[in-house]
Amino acid sequence: AKGGMAIKVGALPTVSTRVMPQAVHLFKQDNTGTVVRVVTGENSVLLSQLRTGDLDLVVGRLADPELMTGLSFEHLYSERVSFIVRPGHPLLKVKPFNLAKLAGYTVLMPTEGSIIRPMVDRFLIAHGIGSLPDQIETVSMAFGRRYTRMSDAVWLISRGVVAEDLEEGVLAELPIATDAATGPVGLTTRADIPPSLPAVMLMQTIREAARTKDKAA
């Protein structure tokens, strides 16, 4: 944007769906001259772009310690992984619910490089599920949402990504207590460079949006 300021934010899918639209909307009410560029991708890619200065801040899950060198993290809220299916899915009728039944269905898993994958793996192993024979790996929201609605697949995804779908009743959540698979979501910035004024203002609206998100959830 010639003449105007641009602010570049990396956002994980978790926050692109709920927090970022609200945050940017609030930001734009005060800051009409600043272009906001919202980039999505895997956490490790976003963090390396933050390091090189291609991004001003990253909003997403807390990364592994070795990826956080020279970066600082501010916790906004915690988010859990959910098991999502289409409304009317056969597993919704299983009472009491039995996790072992997952093995009979296609399971949409987060990809190997994604930040929630280790959490999902640990959760499944802790519940005696060593491997799921029929898996699709994806971090694509559009693919996951559509595939889950058209099939009997079970989608393992951060709950925030599908919160609105659940509210609208287009997707449903299996009754699995996944409190163990919960991780912190927050703002990551470079520790050595103070953020620009627009970045400071956007960080403030992200905090506000994260606070209202919990009331809406």
Image: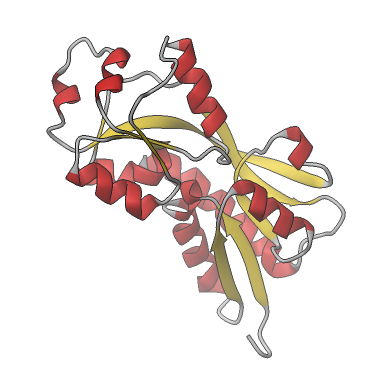
**Front residue (pair 98, 131):** 131
Residue 119 against residue 26 in the figure, above or below? above
Q: Residue furthest front?
A: 133
Q: Residue at coordinates 21% horizontally, 45% vertically from top-left? A: 149
Residue 33 against residue 202 in the figure, above or below? below
Q: Residue furthest bottom?
A: 3
Looking at the figure, which quarter contains the C terminus?
A: top left
Taking 59 as reference, is 151 left or right?
Answer: left
Q: Classify residue 9 by image quadrant.
A: bottom right
**Front residue (pair 216, 61):** 61
Residue 26: x, y in percent? 50, 64
Residue 192: x, y in percent? 87, 54
Residue 129 against residue 92 in the figure, above or below? above
Taking 176 as reference, is 62 left or right?
Answer: right
Q: Classify residue 84 by image quadrant.
A: top left
- Residue 170 visible? The answer is no
Q: Classify residue 67 by image quadrant.
A: top right
Residue 87: x, y in percent? 16, 36
Residue 130: x, y in percent? 45, 15
